[in-house]
Amino acid sequence: MSDVLTNPFERSRYLGTVARVSPLGVRANFPFATEIAPSQYAGHRVTRGQVGEFVVIESFGSAIIGRITEIRLPDKDRLTVEPERNQDDGEPNPVGIIRLLGSVDLNSRQSSRGIGEVPRVGDYVYLAHPDLIRHAIVSTHGKQSALVDLGHLSGSPETRIALSPASVFGRHCAVLGSTGGGKSWSTARLVEEIAARNGKVILLDPTGEYHTLGEGAEHVHLGGVRDDEKDKRRFVSFPYHHLTEADLFAFLQPSPGVQAPKLRDAIQTLKLMQLEPGLLEQGEYKFVKENRPKKPFNSAVVKHDRELHAQSAYFDMTILVEQLFEECVYPVGEKNHWGNRHQFAFDSCVTLGMRITTHQKSQHMAPIFAPLDYMDDVTKVIEEFVDDPNVYVLRISMRYLAFEQHIRELVVNAIGRYLLGRARDGRFHEVPVVVAIDEAHQFLSRTVGEEANRISLDAFGLIAKEGRKYGLTCLLATQRPRDIPEDVLSQVGMFVVHRLINERDQAVVINASGILDASTAAFLPNLRDGEAILVGADSIMPLPVKMNPPRKKPRLQENVEETWMTKV
């Protein structure tokens, strides 16, 4: 590495000369670009000028780094490369466009996005040594074992790319790419790298394909039922009392006129009964308001105001319908008492009561409204995971969680809100946690529910914006970057961008990264499987990398090795 930085301008790597300079880039002569076979020098492949190659321009006291984005022949030389033409037709004179990316000060050996002194006409252009590119983009200070080995520079297997964990996960990480480009493999690899460093990652797995994760991983299933008593899988629930009022209303859809206020009152009453059971008359299990005095109840509400509004305050939903009807009374009666039954309100709440009962009996809703006895509370599982020094990955599979009634979206959003709440309480300061979410576009930048009870899925957006200071960061994986809010992507410090074909997806990444430009994004549709462009907030330029495959490749459990479609 020191030799490369001492003399980055090796004659054997000479490509050509700067012919024109503009604010948008440099045009250079590449006299050897039509040579067919590349050569080898010092164990590295040396080309004579190809699109996508990194180059270094010799400047006073610094090495200016750029990338070739175009090579062409002037119109008058177009036919000189035709094999059937006579040799007397002259030599071809290729010219190319170089996009300037940054520079390396040869004295301090520090890289910078800025260009201290722009190239001049006549400056020499050299093929950049892979180690020089690696030095310009990443810092390898510290113990080599602590670095995250991501892969190797595309076209240069001997040049490994390793980053510090803080530069990959410290400011959130996004893995983007169309189906089949390697997104899931890269996500699995990053999760494995966190576990290898005894870090903590909570993986939300919508499809169940990460069940292959092995040592140091605990697998739980959100929803589903046991096959039989021999089924040793661990099933978990997200009980209803962890939901906010907005979440519950999105599920139950009360009408705004009568049903919503009465449902709100019923939930508050049931929470208060848990805190002040003495308010109940002997033999009662629900609080009857009809013609009862208000003062004891109102005093208890004031006394327990904080507990009533606390996150995850418990109430017994099995009697919610009955308590709902008990709320249907006139607000004022005799001597500061509630009045008689309000028949119109009672009749209006009948349909809501039926809806609540349907949800309680629904098998799809069971993980929320009626968890089975063997289902553990997922929030308690998360707390145990954070405290367990021997488990590094908690995979929460949503394979069995239904899509009806927006169950998945609301539950995942609620989990994100729970994690952010615990982060704000200081839970993750000593043990930072990365929450990884695959198919992230399903759970961000959406609103669910009818107009009167619409809720925005904003939990992971809030984590992206403020979680980092609390020790909670995100690893977002998606094939549809255009469906992720730009204000969320703008908080991401490391992008791993696999093949992206859609121009809208490319534009979103360009705007969010601040480093990737249109000339570099033009390479995205042609990336090979497993190849990605790394775009880091602390790096001076995007870096094409062949990503390492995961040790345990993700695979859907339903997939079989051979079918009539795969037989040869």
Image (cartoon, helix red, strand yellow):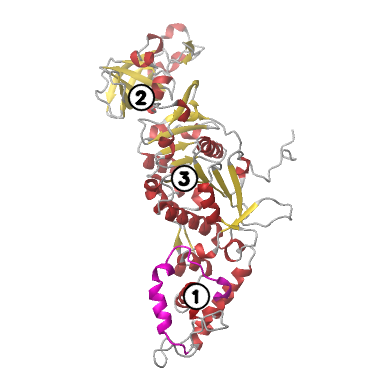
Q: Which residue is mark 1?
A: 273
Q: Which residue is mark 3?
A: 433
Q: Position of residue 91 (x, y in %)?
A: 41, 10
Is 480 magenta? The answer is no
Query: Measuring 39% from the left and 79% from the top, which residue is drawn there?
Result: 299
Q: Residues within 10 Å of mark 1 (few under 14, many from 20)?
A: many
Query: Measuring 51% from the left and 81% from the top, which residue is drawn there?
Result: 280
Query: Measuring 39% from the left and 74% from the top, which residue is drawn there?
Result: 303
State the SS at label 1.
helix
Q: Residues within 10 Å of mark 3 (few under 14, many from 20)?
A: many
- The C terminus sits in image quarter: top right
Magenta residues span 291-320
Disc on the earlier residue, 2 or 1: 2
Q: Quadrant of residue 246?
A: bottom left
Q: Position of residue 302 (x, y in %)?
A: 38, 75
- Foreground residue, 146 or 360? 146
- The N terminus sits in image quarter: top left
Q: Is residue 530 above or below residue 41?
A: below
Q: Residue furthest bottom?
A: 334
Residue type at numbered disc 1: Met
Asked if marks 2 and 1 touch (Cβ < 8 Å), the reply is: no
